[in-house]
Amino acid sequence: MCGICGELFFNDHPVNEKSVKIMNKDMIKRGPDHEDTYHGIWASLGHRRLKIIDLSDESNQPFIDPKLGLILVFNGAIYNFKELRKELEQLGYTFYSRGDTEVILKAYHAWGEDCVKKFNGMFAFVIYDQKNNCVFMARDRLGIKPLYFFKTPESLIFASSLPAILKTGNVAKNISKEALHFYMSLHAVVPAPYTLIEGVRKLPPATTMTIKKDGTVIQRPYWNLNFERDNEEGQYTFEDWKQYLATAFMAAVKRRLVADVPVGVLLSGGIDSSLIVGLLAEAGQKDLKTFSIGFESVGGEKGDEFMYSDIIARHFATDHHKIRVNSDQVLPSMTACVQAMSEPMVSHDCIGFYLLSKEVAKHVKVVQSGQGADEIFGGYHWYPPMMDSDNPVQDYCNVFCDRTNDEFQQIVHNDFQGDDFTSQFIEKRFSLPGAQIPVDKALRIDSTIMLVDDPVKRVDNMTMAWSLEARVPFLDHELVELAAKIPSQHKVGNGGKYILKEMARSVIPNEVIDRPKGYFPVPALKYIQGKYLDFVKTVLKSDTCKSRKIIRNEYIDLLLESPEAHITPLKGSKLWQVTLLEFWMQQNGI
């Protein structure tokens, strides 16, 4: 887990390291163990390393292979690198390090752009190919690792962090009209390739990008998620699918133990993280460190799930750490939390993950986490209405979107009014082949779009703020492919995640499986009052906000007058959504 950055210079433009040094310095938390840069004929690369696999300096980056003429910067982890190394050795390649970094380089040389299809893991990497005079970039199938870029006629800047790119001073920092519509409609999700900043793009998941010296850019998708079953799969029974699922998930959890440092688990007390703990125990893990966080209750809403995490910790005799956070800790940490966001993320639990990661990083450098299960296995309440939908796009918008297009047009200034970008985007995604029935269309967009730019990005940003690597077994691409094939009624039925719950019964206690659905609660940011309301007013009543001319001031006044009256269909605060957007812009000098 690291931070990567670089700048590519086109058409014989002079090469310099100025931007790379600025970005590398800004990403120190992503990789405090080593820093270096590389200066080539038309490429300048930077890297920040967090040592997880091969703790020696042999895997430091930028990783250079002068014989092959390749230079690599890489963020992530390739879990099957040992198997690939053996395969490459049989092809005649020799290795000088013991990690996964060199395997990527040799795999690219052996198999070209198709090397990405060989990797099981999370990754964003960039290879400067001197012999072919091109640069090759790739991002993992589920977008677990980020990669942002900004292109001008003279150069292309890239980094693991959007704020790092902004700090170079090369970007005008104008707000994207399309991205604002997405942000205000999809719980702050801005789908790739868009970002909130006009001109700054993110490489879509499951996509490669080749850049040539003249500035030509070619993007290619290399994977898609197919929900259709072949004739043999159509004959599988519920028990067949459950057995395949048990095998695939155990493999996913075991893969994420590949490390030269101990691996812990973020234990929320829900079925997802509890199942990870149970399977690790079943696989023979001893003295497993687990971590839970809880907040004060607000408005009668409980702020922790310790009752359930305690059950799992006792059942599997883990080395359990309960982290209690009172309201006095939240606001003082808010500025640093927002500064750690590559893009504004409105989810209340960002601060929870930020504070949890701070404590966890004192004990381990790697954790497994349960993100993705609800999207992959149909755990959310909006899936059942999609089972028999006659109008999938409209029904999805009704149950999922924070506000209608009409409301959006009324609350933004004239420059940001226009098309219904969100509905158009959803309609386009729903029309793609590979998912025929409405609920499968919803599951696909959630697992390949909404998941990437909400919980997955949230976990990456908040853990990396404390130099902590988070691994997400529910997003193992082989497990995700299998889950997509499972008939929707086996997932959405019985209150959601039906087949996952039934599979889990042989692993973890039923009282955790059959509990009411929970989430990572931070009630104070849903029911904004007291000093939290004072903080919000400070942000939204600032001269900067008043003069910005994005969200209308009269709408902000309406939200401030009665925060509890303006809650999104998915139970988020519209006031916090607007506040977070403004505060993120202020922190990034926008």
Image (spheres, rainbow, N blue to C red):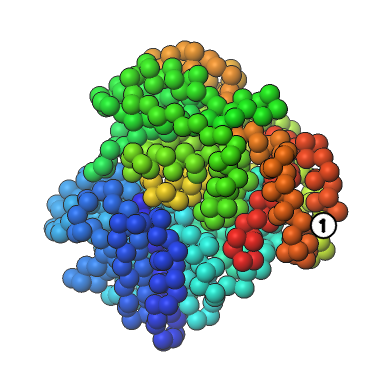
Closer to the camera, 173 or 189? 173
What amino acid is labelled 1 in the image?
Arg
> Does residue 36 appear anywhere in the picture?
yes
Relative to residue 296, is residue 114 drawn left or right?
left
Closer to the camera, 290 or 385? 290
Relative to residue 112, is residue 215 drawn left or right?
right
Q: Residue furthest top?
A: 510
For image coordinates 73% across by 44% down, the residue present is 533
For image coordinates 48% across by 50% down, the residue present is 461
Residue 515 appears in which quarter of the rendering? top right
Q: Is residue 310 above or below residue 431?
A: above
For image coordinates 46% across by 32% down, the residue present is 323
Quarter of the image for the C terminus: give it: bottom right
Q: How far across and how far down the image is residue 567, in percent?
A: 75, 37
For image coordinates 43% across by 24% down, the residue present is 274
Q: Residues within 10 Å of mark 1 (few under 14, many from 20)?
A: some
Per the image, the residue denoted by label 1 is 552
Q: How far across and how far down the image is residue 480, in percent?
A: 45, 36
Q: Is residue 211 above or below residue 413?
A: below
